[in-house]
């Protein structure tokens, strides 16, 4: 019982880190980062927040990408990473839908 829970937590953490690395290399993320750097006139780094992990009702790792300062975290993208198909989808807030990204 305990060993299974520990194993699941380790696997979950490792897999979410793999998704985060994949998200960092998406054109949409790199282009948005470049856009912010041009506007601000300096290099910036995005923060990546693991919002949720898969469970019995949910197959997704939900990873938020954004900018943060000492006061708040501003979400720019919400990615849904499918733990079964390995696909990454972007949440489209205007249409309340998921769009597959490559």
Image (spheres, rainbow, N blue to C red):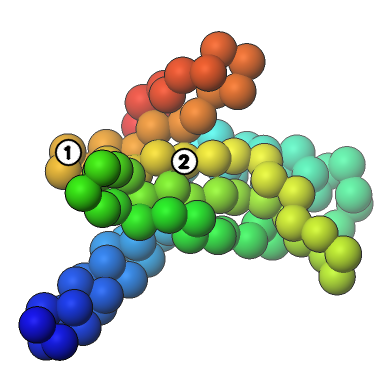
Q: Secondary structure at mark 1?
A: loop
Earlier-in-chain disc, 1 versus 2: 2
Q: Secondary structure at mark 2?
A: strand
Left or right: residue 46 versus residue 26 is: right
Left or right: residue 64 versus residue 5 is: right
Residue 19 place in picture, x, y as percent: 35, 55
- Name the residue rendered at 55%, 35% in the picture: 28
Residue 92 place in picture, x, y as percent: 54, 23
- Name the residue rendered at 90%, 51% in the picture: 41
Q: Residue furthest bottom?
A: 2
Residue 91 place in picture, x, y as percent: 50, 29
- Disc 1 from disc 2: Cα separation: 14 Å
Numbered marks: total:
2
- Is residue 43 at all visible to an observer of this figure? no
Identify whether 95 is placed above or below 19: above
The quadrant of the image that shows the N terminus is bottom left
The quadrant of the image that shows the C terminus is top left
Q: Kindly identify which residue carries mark 1.
A: 85
Residue 69 place in picture, x, y as percent: 83, 65
Nearer-the-camera pick, 95 or 28: 95
* Mark seen at residue 30: none
Nearer-the-camera pick, 61 or 21: 61
Mark 2, other Cα within 10 Å: few <14 / some 14–19 / many ≥20: many
Identify whether 50 is placed above or below 6: above
- Is residue 36 at all visible to an observer of this figure? yes
- Name the residue rendered at 39%, 32% in the picture: 89
- Name the residue rendered at 56%, 59% in the picture: 48
* Mark seen at residue 79: 2
């Amino acid at each position: 019982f305990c060993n299974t829970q520990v194993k699941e937590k380790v696997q979950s953490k490792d897999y979410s880190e793999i998704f985060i690395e994949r998200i960092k290399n998406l054109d949409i993320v790199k282009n948005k980062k470049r856009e912010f750097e041009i506007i601000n006139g300096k290099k910036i780094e995005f923060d990546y927040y693991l919002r949720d992990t898969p469970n019995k009702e949910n197959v997704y790792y939900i990873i938020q990408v954004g900018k943060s300062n000492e006061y708040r975290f501003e979400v720019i993208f919400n990615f849904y990473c499918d733990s079964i198909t390995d696909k990454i989808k972007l949440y489209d807030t205007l249409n309340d839908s998921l769009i597959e990204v490559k």
